[in-house]
Amino acid sequence: MSSYRASGYWYDKGTSVPGAVDLLNLMRRFREAERKMRAQTRNSMGMNETDMSALRFLLAEHRKGVIPRQRDFAAELGISHASISVLIDRLCRDGYAERIVHPSDRRSVGIIPTQYSDTEVRGTLHEMHERMMDAVNMLSEGERIAAAKFLEAMIRSVEIADRPTEPPAPKGTQSSGLAEGAIPSIQPDNA
């Protein structure tokens, strides 16, 4: 049983194990801290959220040895090809990316990060990444396994919540349990 008190994140005397609500509150605090950090990073780099997402995608693809095309950005970010073109123009204008002839298809344009973008992102986020690694390195192997199990379960719970659900039936009606368009079988009364 949790010793969680509604007023905060402290535990009663003698209790050192956080309860379920405590962990969920800590997750909420982490998400809020991360949201603030991302906003501060975007502001310091003069970018909006979509530009920052595009830059993260570009750098991740570069680390994998992949040269993305504009259509790859559109698919990743879920925005139109026209919007991607404007976004890539901005990244190039601000010195974060450049367009090149794609090495595997000379008729296509590839997007690569500049040395400036890598240096800027590393300089902006380096200290935070170091602190995060320090926090993870403080955990024992068993604690890392437990943390990974917890985080994977949290990811699954959110992914399930993202799935579309059937709207509830209007009050006063009962669901037949049949799929829409299904024809119920007729059973004799003595069946």
Image: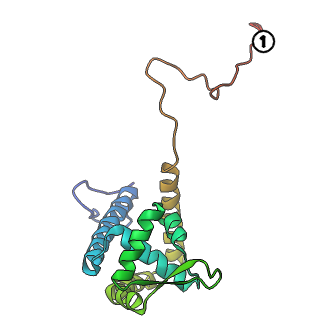
- Disc 1 crowd, CA 10 A, few/some/many (<14, 14-19, 20+): few
Q: Quadrant of residue 42?
A: bottom left
Q: As displayed, is residue 121 above or below residue 70?
A: below
Asked which quadrant contains residue 22, the reply is bottom left
Q: Nearer the viewer, residue 68 or 188?
A: 68
Q: How many marks?
A: 1
Q: Which residue is mark 1?
A: 191
Front residue of 11/62: it is: 62
Choose between 179 and 141: the one closer to the eye: 179
Secondary structure of the residue carrying numbered label 1: loop
Residue 38 in sight in this render: yes
> As drawn, is 18 to the left or to the right of 11?
right
Percent position of residue 86, x then y: 39, 69
Q: Nearer the viewer, residue 70 or 136?
A: 70
Residue at horizontal 39 percent and vertical 84 percent from the top = 96
32 w.r.t. 183: above or below: below
Q: As drawn, is 164 to the left or to the right of 107?
A: left
Please identify the quadrant where the C terminus is shown: top right
**The N terminus - image quarter:** bottom left
Q: How is the image coloured?
A: rainbow
**Residue 97 percent location from the top left of the image:** 43, 83
Q: Is residue 6 above or below residue 122?
A: above
Q: Residue furthest left?
A: 7
Extreme residue in the front direction = 107
Residue lying at 44% horizontally and 63% vertically, measured from the top left: 82
Residue 121 point in image, percent of width and height:
37, 85
Q: Determine if residue 15 is in view.
A: no
What residue lies at 70% left-to-right and 20% top-to-bottom? 183
Question: Which amino acid, by three-letter code, is at mark 1?
Answer: Ala
In the picture provided, is 33 more to the left or to the right than 142?
A: left
